[in-house]
Amino acid sequence: MSGGLVRRWLSTSGRPPHEIAAAEPPERLAAALVRNLAECTGGKTAYAVPTERSHVVVESWPPGLSGVADAVGAEQVGSTGGALFVIAPGKWDDAARALLRDTAAWLDVAVQLARLHVDHAAADQRARRLNAELNSARARLARVRDLERHRLVQAITATTLRDLGEVRKSLRAVTEEGTERAAAVLEDLIDDFRSVVRGVFPAMLPDRGPRAALEELAATLPRAVSFEGDLGRRAGWQLESGFYHAVAAALNLLAGKASAHPLTVTFGRDDALRARIHAPGAPAEAELRYALGQDVERLAVLGGGMECVVVDGAAVITVRLAERVELAPPAVDPAELERSAVYRKVRELVRQGQAAVGGAPGRAEWDAVAERLTMPPRLAVVGPGGDIKGGALASIIVFDTPADRELAEELRADDDPRGGVDGVLCRVPAAPEFREALLTGRNRVVLAESGSVGSLAARLAAHGPVIAARRAVVAMRELVRGLPAGHQLRWAVERVGADAHEFAELDLLDDLERGGVLRVAATAAARLLGADGIDPRTRLGLPPSATDEEVLTAARAAVTRWRAHAEHPANGSRDRAACEVLVRTAEGLLAPKGTAC
């Protein structure tokens, strides 16, 4: 079909797509193109992306279309994976088909533009955060360098002044006894210098690695030290040196005096070098942290961490130094995020928060929330990694360590590059305290002790926008406390957190999995909440080919069913509250999901 015929046909029924692209801002372009196509063809149009069973509608006109089963025309939208559909058009001829192709081409441009905009915003936020971290690290490095210089000077001068003084006194004596005493003092002096030099540059470290160097150090200490585990392949010099000095500082502190109880060092390796030092009969926790404060600072500058705790009278010091300070998450399609209304609301609140603080010191925290909002869910695999599939759906991190409370706290930590996870697949026996610590944090974590990485990653990705929005709301509740008492963001954040039905659906899914509610109808309830897929047909148990009328009929039946279930006299208050959530979910499948422009 020639462009001239399309223009003549459009002269009375709409505008060419290129005029829409020239007039609309990037964030409204996709919706405007979809609406223009619907008005030109006199029917319904939808831009949808495929799922395992059917399609999820991203933009539609009129708003609220739930499926594309009745489409008479479809056109792929470039490399996005989605397609543009025309349903029940009033006019469907060669000109309409040409308009569909032109609109799909411009819609591809709109989607790519939206992706670039999201990528640019995320890169800008990440650059600001990394720049702030760089400046902080430089300041801390300068402080650590000064402290280390002072420590070395003190060690050398103290050795020189004390032992050389003893040597001079002994040499003044002419007797044989004086000579023997001077020789003994000289030997002690040489040993002390060796210890100082070994602390600065252990000779065995570059040749045989940190474990061998630490074993050499342990052989000189008065307390017995045993080593377990393995550090795997050799790492870079800077990484091994920083790891060695951190563990050596802990050994010198805890094994510097004789004890009947041996000290144990357990090594581990995933994407970081790890060591766990266990020493019975430890000093107080505050003393540990004070004595190792300089080493904690030095390790933090290198992107690692050192934690000191006392458990049942024993010191437990964990050292971790990652090969990569920051993991690069896979990209997220903005269309997947935009399909969630609550996500769009929360994103707007985050932007308002960034604008409210401006360039104040609190801006970094708001930027971190905005950056995490655009990232895919984080999935931790505890145990052997094996064949990891699902990396395109979630950011996957492997922890080949025991599933204990210490690991759970690390997985929950939002300030750790490997923490703040949204889901955990545990392939090793999980301690009860691991489950308790993991599931009682302020952020929701899905714990699975069976199944595959791919299935859990797909499940998290299906609810990805809602999971990201909920995590952002939790973070913003803390951040808005720094705003003036009457600031509108304070109540806006609380309101979206309390009113968002999508958050209530996630909570009910968790309760169903734990067997806390609706035991006799848990499977049907979980399906309606999106456990098997979030598109309306999957939620209602319909085949992908079901028509929109069949969807409406099934949704009405679901509303009736769960209302009747809520009114059953045998149900308790928790079951009735769960049924109310399910009724609202089913009602949402009857009503438009929002506006497209």
Image (cartoon, rainbow, N blue to C red):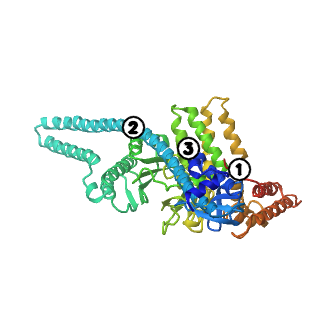
Label 1 with label 3: CB-CB less than 8 Å? no
Q: Nearer the viewer, mark 1 or mark 3?
A: 1
Q: Nearer the viewer, mark 1 or mark 2?
A: 1
Q: Nearer the viewer, residue 123 or 468?
A: 123
The circle drawn on residue 594 is: 1
**Which residue carries the number 2 mark?**
140
- The answer, for residue 437, to whether it is visible in the render is no
Label 1 with label 2: CB-CB less than 8 Å? no
Q: Amino acid at mark 3?
A: Val
Query: How far from the left and from the top, in percent, is residue 75?
Result: 59, 63
The Cα–Cα distance between marks 1 and 3, rounded to whole angstroms, is: 25 Å
Query: How far from the left and from the top, in percent, is residue 573?
Result: 82, 54
Q: For the residue carrying disc 3, how many other residues have a C-alpha within 10 Å: few (<14), some (14-19), or many (20+)? A: many
Q: Amino acid at mark 1?
A: Gly
- The answer, for residue 530, to whether it is visible in the render is yes
Is 478 situated above or below 207? Answer: above
Q: Secondary structure at mark 1?
A: loop
Q: For the residue carrying disc 2, how many other residues have a C-alpha within 10 Å: few (<14), some (14-19), or many (20+)? A: some
Q: Nearer the viewer, residue 322 or 527?
A: 527
Q: Secondary structure at mark 2?
A: helix
Q: Residue at x 58, y 39 (%)?
A: 351
**In this rendering, would 593 be left or right of 254?**
right
Q: What is the total number of numbered labels drawn onto the structure image?
A: 3
Q: Nearer the viewer, residue 503 or 52?
A: 52
Is 562 situated above or below 192? Answer: below
The circle drawn on residue 369 is: 3
Q: Answer with mark 2 or mark 3, whichever residue precedes in sequence.
A: 2
